[in-house]
Each structure stands twice: as C-alpha cells, then as structure tokens.
C-alpha cells in the first residue's frame, strides 16, 4: 500500500474555520474542488465528515455531482440523534449520491456499551446503509471499552508524536488482535506542532518542552516537522488510516511531498562494525575499510566492552544493535522501532523481550547511558558476551526499575517463530537456499512466508533451539 492510500482526508476545514494554527479560514468552492481533485489523483479515497462540520457535506455533494465520481465517506453521530439514525443516514447517502457510508462513528464514546447503540448499528448494516460501525475515542478507558464491543469495527483515536505508543501501544496491539480497524487523528495536534513553543496559550504551556525537543531534532537532522509528524504515524503498520485535514490544495500537495520524501538516512549518524581483535577477523576489518565504514575492534568474549568502546569512539547517544548472525534484519522494521524510541522515554526497545518476529530479525535500541551502566555493573560471563542481558534483567519488564524497556510486538502475528539466524552449519544451508530462491533485500516476511510454504526447507534447522548460544553462556554463569 502506498502511504498516501492510508490518508483519510478530514473535511472539518472545508466547512468551518478549524484548527489552532488555521491562517486562511474556510476555503472557497473552487479551492475545495482543487483539494478533492488532488486527493483523488494521489490515491486518497476516503473522506471524514459530519453534519456538525458546517458546509462540508454540501461541498462534498457538489463535488460528487460535478466530478461524476464519489469518495468513500466516514461520518459521525451523537447519542442525542439515536432515534433518527436511519432517517439521517439515508438522507446523508442520498445527498452525497452514495449507496452506503464506509463507516458511521459514534461520537459519544462513553455510550459504546449501550445496547441500543449496538442494535441501531445492526439495523443500519442490515439495511446496507453503512458497511462498518465505529466509535471516536479520546481516553484509554474509552479505547478499552471499544475494543471489547464486538459490534465495533472501526476505532478512531488521537495518535501523534506526543500521544503515541507509550500511551496506547499495548491497546492498539490488542485491538488489532481482535480484528479492529484503527484510524488515527490529530497527527499535527490541530496545527500545534507548527506554533512556536514560546507562543503557546497558557493552558498548553506544559507541551512547550516537548515541542522544543521536536523542533531541535528537526533542525539537527534537517527535517521538516510536517514530514516527521506524518511519517511517524503513517509508518506504524498497526494503523490502517490516518486522518489529515488541510486548508488548501497547496497544503495537501506539501503533505503528499513530505510523505513521499521519507526520512533521511542520516538520522542514523554512523554505521560501525564492532569486531574482535583476533587475526581471523582481519578480513572483516579489511572489508570495512573497502566500504569506508568505521571498524572498532575489541575483546572476542567481552562483547559488552567491545560495544562500549565503539559507542564511545563514535560519540553515540543512542545505539541500534544489529548482530551479524541476523542477515535478514529489515531496515523498515528498524525505522519503525526508531520512531517509537525517539518519541518515548524508554532506555531500551527491542523486539526480542518476547518473540513475535522470526529468530534472526532481532533489533535492539538503547541509550548510551544504559550501555554505560551495563558496562560498569555487568559481571556474569553471559552479561559480558551478549551485551544487553544486564539491561534486560534490570528493566521494568522483569520487575526491576533500573531501566524502562518496551517490547516491540509484531502487529501481524505469525503462526510459528521460524529460524532466520546464522549460528550453525544447518542455518547456513537454509539461508543459502533462501537467497538462491528469493535473492537478498526482501522484507523479512517474504523469507518467513517462503519457509512456511516450504516445510522441507524449514526443517533443515528446526532442531536448533531458540537462543542456543545464550543458554550455553548461562551454563558458564552456573545459572542454567
């Protein structure tokens, strides 16, 4: 799916003067048509509207008639209009020239468990006036209720750089596991991201520090705030649609350009190969020199010291750990995890605290401060050889409070943890077959799915246990 196809065009700005940072007011009919033309040309097919959005429905209806083409429509209703629901939806559909709404959302989320609401939604679906029933939530308590409401298909919630997985990540994963469609709004906090932090109204001053940090990072890495805000949400594979409102066609074009540009690779400042001082690894150092990649060398068995040395030499403040026994690690996954890490206050983010990805698609991200503590305090052989066990064991995920950690879960669960790592000759045999049949550089799921479709390949290394090397080092500790 193209990222623009995940965009849901909000229409509040088409019918009202809407948004904290709205400088132009409500656009005229000609400008609205330009906006909607541009949206269609770029694969945006879904509009979010409501009766309460002033002239928005009128503008959409006129466009449908003039363009002889129709968007998919999401609309909303308040609980006070429950008795007239069928009549109102029928009128809206006729007015817009459509057979049914894509989704109809309850705006009063606290009423989501009202049995009358469920009954009304079933009637609307039975009459084919709507295809999906949904709710617009604000709080996590409302979100939880919506997840547990079996008749709710679509949940719309706030999600952005400041209101993100730190606050809602586990609930979003739970909602996806129950088959809910997740739509998000407030990607720009109604334009708040573009206001100077010093100009915030008094009631919004608590956000000043966070906005200053975002602005500083954008300046440091040469990023546009609109691109960072959009890419952060659109890059989350658990989110099905992202609501974005615009005041002009030029603004929509800027947003589309920001989506297409992607985040620059220099957000990761440097790639460093941290290998051993053994003569046998001279070939690795030579290859690093050929590729003009920094190579830092240290102890073979004290890999923690080797990582610490490499990080200190580079002046790193955040480390992304990718090991050489994970040849199929996916850069898109790294990007998603980095977005979460930079928008949170975690010391450690990994997709291996609980395995939901294949063995060998392992990514760990941690702060230099966490690495410093591990380097100075880790004493067991397993903690020195495998770099991060000290951090993991002393994190809140293990009941300790030294480090704040987060497990990055696969939003599309897999039936089996396949083995895509390289530790044993059997692993090399399996990986060689995958490369011969599929090539390199494919998304991790391509290789995983191929193994699931070809059990004769999958069984080549199936006898090897998960994290076999780590368990061997635990025996040296006398703890396994």
Image: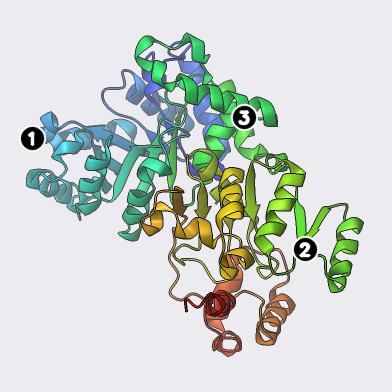
What colouring does the structure picture have? rainbow
Which type of secondary structure does the marked residue at label 1 adopt? helix
The answer for how far apart the CA atoms under marks 2 and 3 are is 31 Å
Could one spot residue 309 in this view of the protein? yes
Tell me what residue is drawn at x 36 percent, y 50 percent. Answer: 172
Asked if the residues shown at circle 2 and circle 3 are in contact, with their CB atoms under 8 angstroms apart, the answer is no
How many other residues sit within 10 Å of disc 1, few (<14), some (14-19) or many (≥20)? Answer: few
Left or right of 91 in this view: 374: right
To which residue does mark 1 refer? 83
Could you tell which of marks 2 and 3 lies nearer the N-terminus?
Answer: 3
From the viewer's perspective, is residue 363 above or below residue 85?
Answer: below
- In x, y percent, where is residue 395? 44, 53
**How far apart are the alpha carbons under marks 3 and 1?**
50 Å
Specify whether residue 246 is in view.
no
Towards the viewer: 154 or 399: 399
Front in this rendered view, residue 434 or 468: 468
Q: Which is more foreground, mark 3 or mark 1?
A: 3
- The residue singled out by tag 2 in the image is 275
Instruction: Give the residue displayed 63% in from the left and 67% down from the top.
Output: 385
Among numbered discs 1 and 2, the one appearing first in the sequence: 1
Among numbered discs 3 and 1, the one appearing first in the sequence: 1
Residue tagged 3: 217
* Element type at mark 3: helix
Residue 178 figure quarter: bottom left
Q: In which quarter of the image is residue 275?
A: bottom right
């Amino acid at each position: 799916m193209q990222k623009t196809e995940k965009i849901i065009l909000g229409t509040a700005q088409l019918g009202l003067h809407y948004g904290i940072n709205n400088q132009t007011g409500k656009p005229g009919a000609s400008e609205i048509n330009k906006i909607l033309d541009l949206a269609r040309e770029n694969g945006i097919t879904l509009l979010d509207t409501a009766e309460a959005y002033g002239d928005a429905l009128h503008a959409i209806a006129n466009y449908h008639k003039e363009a002889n083409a129709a968007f998919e429509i999401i609309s909303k209703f308040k609980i006070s209009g429950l008795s007239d629901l069928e009549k109102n939806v029928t009128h809206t559909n006729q007015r817009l020239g459509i057979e049914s709404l894509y989704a109809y959302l309850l705006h009063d989320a606290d009423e989501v468990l009202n049995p009358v609401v469920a009954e009304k939604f079933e009637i609307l679906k039975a009459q084919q006036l709507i295809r999906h029933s949904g709710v617009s939530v604000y709080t996590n308590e409302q979100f939880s209720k919506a997840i547990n409401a079996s008749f709710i298909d679509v949940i719309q919630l706030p999600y952005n750089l400041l209101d993100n997985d730190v606050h809602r990540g586990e609930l979003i994963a739970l909602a996806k596991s129950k088959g809910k469609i997740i739509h998000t709004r407030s990607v720009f906090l109604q334009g708040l991201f573009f206001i100077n932090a010093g100009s915030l109204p008094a009631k919004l001053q608590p956000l000043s520090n966070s906005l200053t940090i975002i602005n500083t990072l954008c300046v440091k890495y040469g990023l546009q705030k609109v691109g960072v805000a959009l890419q952060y949400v659109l890059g989350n594979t658990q989110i099905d649609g992202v609501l974005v409102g615009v005041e002009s066609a030029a603004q929509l074009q800027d947003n589309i350009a920001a989506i297409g540009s992607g985040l620059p690779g220099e957000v990761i400042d440097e790639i460093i190969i941290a290998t051993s001082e053994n003569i046998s690894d001279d070939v690795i150092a030579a290859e690093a020199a050929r590729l003009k990649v920094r190579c830092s060398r240290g102890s073979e068995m004290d890999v923690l010291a080797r990582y610490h040395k490499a990080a200190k030499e580079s002046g790193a403040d955040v480390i992304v750990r990718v090991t050489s026994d994970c040849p199929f690690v996916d850069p898109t996954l790294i990007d998603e995890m980095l977005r979460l890490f930079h928008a949170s206050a975690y010391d450690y983010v990994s997709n291996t605290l609980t395995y939901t990805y294949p063995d060998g698609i392992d990514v760990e991200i941690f702060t230099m401060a966490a690495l410093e503590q591990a380097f100075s305090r880790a004493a067991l052989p397993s903690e020195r050889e495998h770099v991060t066990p000290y951090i993991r064991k002393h994190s809140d995920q293990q009941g300790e409070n030294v480090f704040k950690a987060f497990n990055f879960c696969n939003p599309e669960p897999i039936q089996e943890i396949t083995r895509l790592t390289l530790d044993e000759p059997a692993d090399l045999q399996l990986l060689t077959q995958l490369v011969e049949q599929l090539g390199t550089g494919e998304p991790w799921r391509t290789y995983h799915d191929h193994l699931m479709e070809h059990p004769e390949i999958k069984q080549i290394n199936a006898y090897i246990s998960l994290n076999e090397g780590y368990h061997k080092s635990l025996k040296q500790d006398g703890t396994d």
